[in-house]
Amino acid sequence: MFWRRREEDPGRAVEDEDTAPEGAGAPVEEAFEQPSPAAGLEAGVAKSRGGFVARLRGLLAGGVPDEAWDDVEETLIAGDVGAGLAARVVGRARAAGSSDPVGAVAAELDALLVARDPGWTPRAARSGQPAIVLVVGVNGTGKTTTIGKLAARYRSEGRTVLLAAADTFRAAAIEQLEAWATRAGAGVVAHQPGADPGAVVYDTIDAAIARGVDLVIADTAGRLHTKTNLMDELAKVRRIVDKRLPGAMPELLFVLDATTGQNGLAQARAFHEAVGLTGIVLTKLDSTAKGGIVFAIEDALRVPVRYVGVGEGIGDLVPFDPDAFVAALFA
């Protein structure tokens, strides 16, 4: 179901007459399979497992001379773990004096991960209110696609979903979100291109409450983390949610392209400082041989990775399970 703000009534978002009446609770249009977290992660880290982790195994096989630990550190850095963190991991694994140095390194990496709840899902803070998820990030990371996949996942779990087309800077973004809503069986609220993003989110929450919708997911315009005015606008959207639903505790998910490495970490840090991220969605994990960015992000920000993208399909966004991730890397 699509609600659009009409020109003759700029103060309200209204339902288009030609859309399906069930909207946010419509059937998922596209049949899909969702791999288990373990299976999805196994496939998603294949390149990393054959890349920097394979080199680690080679260096740590058998006895490990002192000079080999320097190579281990360099290999972790090459895998996007980060220089400072790589030195810390190597120092602790080396000091452990384990007869299984590969296992010692894996254990140190595993201990860095803060999320221990692979069954996490956004929940409403109060009965009768929708759960709120704001999806943020820079341009080109796959935000809108991620929202569509999240909507399909939650719809497949029986939850009703309403999307907020709050990326009003690009008409194409609104159209893309509407297409994903149809595929995922979700509703969407959209205003005219150029409208106030905060107003879109406000109207979406109103519509969700009126219709008893379980979950609101808001798209936002991609923005460079260096643009202060755009980051301030994002903080404004967050304040609007707090005003409309006091105590709602919205989830703020940052979509990060795994192939961007340490630059992506800098982006996430800036967004975290601006709006207080509650989770990371790591896209294109299957496209990189440097999966160490997962450890760098969680260690630096103490913000959990919630989902990872492991393919192009609508079902290829899987919950992040730390233990399964490390096990798959070092399998």
Image (tube, rainbow, N blue to C red):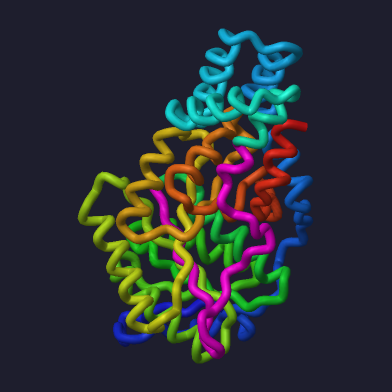
Q: Is 153 situated left or right of 278 in this image?
A: right
User: In the image, is residue 69 part of the stretch drawn in magenta?
Assistant: no
Residue 79: x and y, percent?
Answer: 55, 26
Residue 54: name its quadrant: top right
Residue at 60% from the left image edge and 53% from the top image edge: 307
In this orientation, does residue 179 appear? Answer: yes
In the displayed structure, 67 sits above or below 25; it is above
Q: Which residues are magenta?
A: 109-138
**Magenta stretch contains residue 127:** yes
Furthest-left residue in this view: 229
Q: Position of residue 203 (x, y in %)?
A: 40, 81
Q: Is residue 34 above or below residue 213?
A: above
- Number of numbered callouts drawn: 0
Residue 160, image x and y in percent? 63, 78
Which is nearer the eye, 3 or 269?
A: 269
Magenta stretch, main secondary structure, is: loop
Query: Which residue is at the front of the view, 215 or 321?
Result: 321
Q: Residue at x 61, y 66 (%)?
A: 151
Residue depicted at 42% across the width and 58% down the height: 277
Q: Is residue 183 visible?
A: no
Residue at image position (44%, 44%) is 140
Image quadrant in which the C terminus is located:
top right
Where the N terminus falls, by quadrant?
bottom right
Tell whether 191 sits left or right of 73. left
Left or right of residue 326, residue 187 in this image: left
Query: In the rendering, at what x and y percent does residue 117 appear?
Result: 65, 59
Taking depth in this image into account, of 323 and 159 the one nearest to the observer is 323
